[in-house]
Amino acid sequence: MAVQSTTIDRKLAERPPASLWRDAFERLLRNRLAILGAVIVLLLILLAVFGPFITPYEYSQTDTQLVREARGPANPGEAGHLFGTDILGRDLLSRIMDGARISMTVALVVQVTVLLIGVPIGALAGWFGGRIDNLLMRFTDITYAFPDLLFIILLTVVFKDTWFGGAMDGLLLVFVAIGIVSWVGVARLVRGQMLSLKETEYVEAARAIGVPDRKIVTRHLLPNAIGPIIVAVTLGIPGAILAEALLAFIGIGANPPRASWGTLITDGQTWMSSEPHLLLFPAIAIALALLSFTFLGDGLRDALDPKLKGKQ
């Protein structure tokens, strides 16, 4: 018995100490939908990065002869076009892969914009409280109440003829505009985290020994709030992708011949009755992207919630 007890003690001593991130990762691995979503997200990111090197055709390359022979868009599988072509003879698969690059870029730019605006505002409001909190939260309420679509359209009109409006084929302006109207949720989340964490004992101890407010917020409070922020950012990506597709659908977004998924759906609805693949494939791409990020976000939320630790 003594030998067995010694062996158990040695194994426990050699076992790495438990940590929030390792436990969260283990819980995430047990969530099959979250793993499926992560795999699809990874594939979309790879398509966005390496898509131009593996596409069978350039997204802007036309095959007018094929269109004349087919008297319209080529069907899937015809003449080496796996997903067919559009009315101008451009390969639909190549254009959908270029759309993946746009969607992943909007996921990055919008969420970076959200973090740069929402985190400082929420942290300042939650930490200082009082008049500063009241002022920042009223500004947040006004931003939330303003119609998002109208604000984005106003920004695109004002900056359309500037260098900013032409950057990234007109996409950078749209991405930043979506981010400017999407930071409210993150700001409120960070404010709530600050209000909860600043009453903890380790914060009171840091104050007692004279640690500056800036260091307390950046080194203690924000790192402890990183879990909910990661979840909020991940769950905000589907909304950003859908917003960009909606704007492209109504004609605001990438300059031709760039191929946003929303633009492809706009073009495909014209041929929906005779050439349904022009609408079907871009719609499937958007649905996969939205579902994968949603599954991943839900999985991260469950994995990073300490209250679930005892239930799994």
Image (spheres, helix red, strand yellow):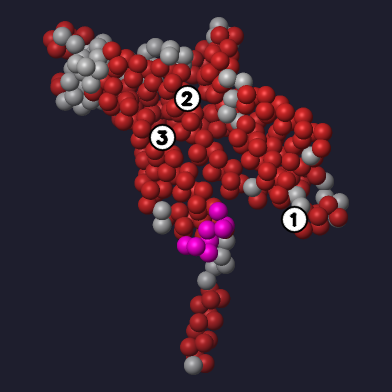
Q: Quadrant of residue 250?
A: top left
User: Could you say which disc has been placed on residue 290 in the image?
Assistant: 3
Along the horizontal axis of the image, is 216 left or right of 30?
right
Q: Which residues are magenta?
A: 305-312
Q: Amino acid at mark 2?
A: Ala
> Can residue 99 be seen from the camera position used here?
yes
Tell me the distance, in whole angstroms, between the alpha carbons under discs 3 and 1: 37 Å
Q: Which residue is mark 2?
A: 243
Q: Nearer the viewer, residue 170 or 146?
A: 146
Question: Which numbered disc flags the more N-terminal residue, 3 or 2?
Answer: 2
Tell me the distance, in whole angstroms, between the alpha carbons under discs 3 and 2: 11 Å
User: Could you say which disc has been placed on residue 200 in the image?
Assistant: 1
In percent of width and height, residue 284 lies at 31, 30
Secondary structure beneath disc 3?
A: helix
Q: Amino acid at mark 3?
A: Leu
Secondary structure beneath disc 2?
A: helix
Secondary structure beneath disc 1?
A: loop
Question: Which numbered disc flags the more N-terminal residue, 3 or 1?
Answer: 1
